[in-house]
Image (spheres, rainbow, N blue to C red):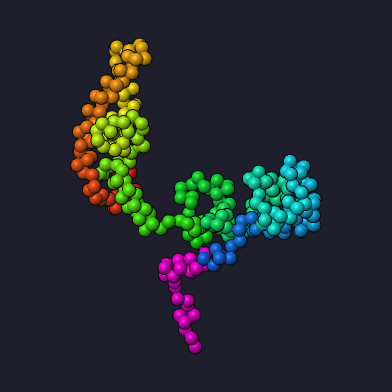
Amino acid sequence: MESEESHESTPRDGSTARKDAADLWAHMLDQAPSFSVALGQRLAEIRKSEKRTTEQVAQQAQQLGLTWHRTTVGQTELGRRSLSAVELLLLPLLYGKPLRELLPDRTTWLTDATAVFPEELWRAIRGGWDEPGAMRHGPGRWHLANRPSADDVIEAVAAWASRSAERWPHGALAKHVAPPDEAEAKAAKKLGTTAHYVAYAARELWGRGLVAEREARLGERPDLPDSPRALQAARGHITRALIEELAPAIRAYEEKRGEPESLDWEAFEQGDSDG
């Protein structure tokens, strides 16, 4: 006689359960129709169960202000026509059922790159999207076909750092990075450097661009000129003074130009936003 232990199933570890879930999810994704097709099939089932014709549905839609015809209903049921947001919201009035009962009850592809489990879709619609971690990925949740892997992200950041090293100063911080304007481009020619270096230096020294700093200092003058010509001369004087203030920082940047960048990957992975 076999012992009771022989009938006990072997417990599965966590990795086995996760693999089973992943395999099932992959199968569901492979078999999943588009959202339009699945919704159309669901609407057709409900219409036929109530013995209504496509013409009757179209007439009721017209009463709600929609420009539907019999062919519109047919194309929608075949999944060849996507519904607008307004049409989707009016479905309960057209079919006499809550929206949840009208939505597909299986995994569907919203786009060529995004698929969703029915419960997750309804959770987003009813307001769950605002909850922490609403965009959940994995089996029975959301699937993003083009979602980059961690290696892809690191590679992209490394490429960005390499390109940035050619444009911005060595060790540049994101909070000081901004596209240079015409005034900064002109100042760069006088300093024998790049407009990006000038734009960065201005924000690092003053917290704003060259023009903004010039106008701020102009406004602080007690003897603000009245005539346009005198005002232009005052701006020129201030600009020359600002360029002199930028010169030491520009020289320091130029000395480090071409040095390899080193990224703190540990800080990056932890989400360090301080640069």
Span colored in magenta: 1-25
Task: Name which quarter of the figure residue 189 lies in.
Answer: top left
Residue 227 spot, x, y in % from top left: 36, 12
Residue 98 spot, x, y in % from top left: 67, 50
Q: How many numbered discs sit on the rendered protein?
A: 0
Is residue 244 in view from this perspective? yes
Task: Tell me if residue 12 comes above or below residue 275 in the rendering.
Answer: below
Please check the rendered image and state whether residue 22 is part of the magenta-colored stretch, yes or no.
Answer: yes
Point 21% across, 44% down: residue:
256
Residue 51 spot, x, y in % from top left: 80, 57
Task: Tell me if residue 155 comes above or below residue 181 in the rendering.
Answer: below
Nearest the viewer among 152 and 57 is 152
Task: Tell me if residue 1 comes above or below residue 203 in the rendering.
Answer: below
Nearest the viewer among 175 and 24 is 175
Point 26% across, 44% down: residue:
171
Task: Name which quarter of the figure residue 32 lies in.
Answer: bottom right
Point 29% across, 11% down: residue:
223
Residue 168 spot, x, y in % from top left: 29, 42
Tell me if 19 is positioned left or right of 212 in this view.
right
Task: Tell me if residue 131 comes above or below residue 150 in the rendering.
Answer: above
Q: Quadrant of the C terminus?
A: top left
Please check the rendered image and state whether residue 149 is part of the magenta-colored stretch, yes or no.
Answer: no
Provide the major secondary structure of the magenta segment: helix
Tell me if 228 is positioned left or right of 56 in this view.
left
